[in-house]
Amino acid sequence: MQPVRRRIAEILKEQGSATVAELADELGMAQVSVRHHLDILVGEDLVESAGVRRRDGAGRPSQIYALTPTADRLFPHRHDALAGDILSEMKAILPGVEVRGVFLRMAEKASHEAPARIPGQALEQRLNEVTSFLTKRGYNARWEVHDGRYAIYACNCPYSGVSNHHHELCLMDQALMEHLIPGVVRVESQALDGASHCTYVIESIPATDESA
């Protein structure tokens, strides 16, 4: 990000909100220049108008600017580190079978957020629903069929950085696929093992889908 716009974002993060005049004073810049940078930040959905601030004396009220939720990505986070530490502590306390049970229950719970499968629904229609659902959850998923062989590709791991040390997350993903997709799902490749994406192959299709 351009240095001045980065500094504007930092000021708004620190102060919560600011007027153009306040930003100009902080930056040592002309207000017209600050407005130019704010216009760009607003266009990028990083900054938004947050109302007006009325002065004690006479004069027009001043527009207040604040960061949008999208701007949160501009600042460091340690979600991966926190999640990794929590999982390490959990695995140190619980037996392995209970740890796996936790992840399997999480997969089942996540599957309930997906569109419900309709009895007799065509497999390809279901695959469209499932890959759309997975993409919204950060997997960047798609499906393909070759010679009657169906496969789902998860092109992004939303748990990257944590799954490297906690392979149970891969077990959770596979269990999620098994809940979402009719038939037997087999993991053919995993990004964890160096593949460009995770591949889930549907080994068998129930009669209800074949006849749909």
Image (cartoon, rainbow, N blue to C red):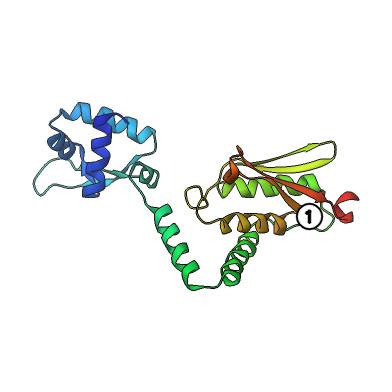
Q: Secondary structure at mark 1?
A: strand
Residue at (61% x, 70% y) in the render: 97
Residue at (78% x, 55% y) in the render: 182
Q: Is residue 22 left or right of residue 181?
A: left
Give percent across and percent down for residue 198. 64, 44
Give percent across and percent down for residue 194. 58, 40
Q: Amino acid at mark 1?
A: Val
Give percent across and percent down for residue 23. 18, 38
Q: Nearer the viewer, residue 123 or 107?
A: 107
Q: Nearer the viewer, residue 46 or 166?
A: 166
| Relative height, residue 64 to residue 162 (above, below) | above
Disc 1 marks which residue? 184
Q: Is residue 33 left or right of residue 89?
A: left
Residue at (67% x, 46% y) in the render: 131
Q: Is residue 209 left or right of residue 13?
A: right
The picture quadrant where one finds residue 11 is top left
| Relative height, residue 7 to residue 202 (above, below) | above
- Whether residue 95 is visible to the viewer of this picture, yes or no, is yes
Q: Nearer the viewer, residue 127 or 189?
A: 189
Give percent across and percent down for residue 12. 25, 44
User: Which residue extends farthest left?
Assistant: 57
- Whether residue 212 is visible to the viewer of this picture, yes or no, is no
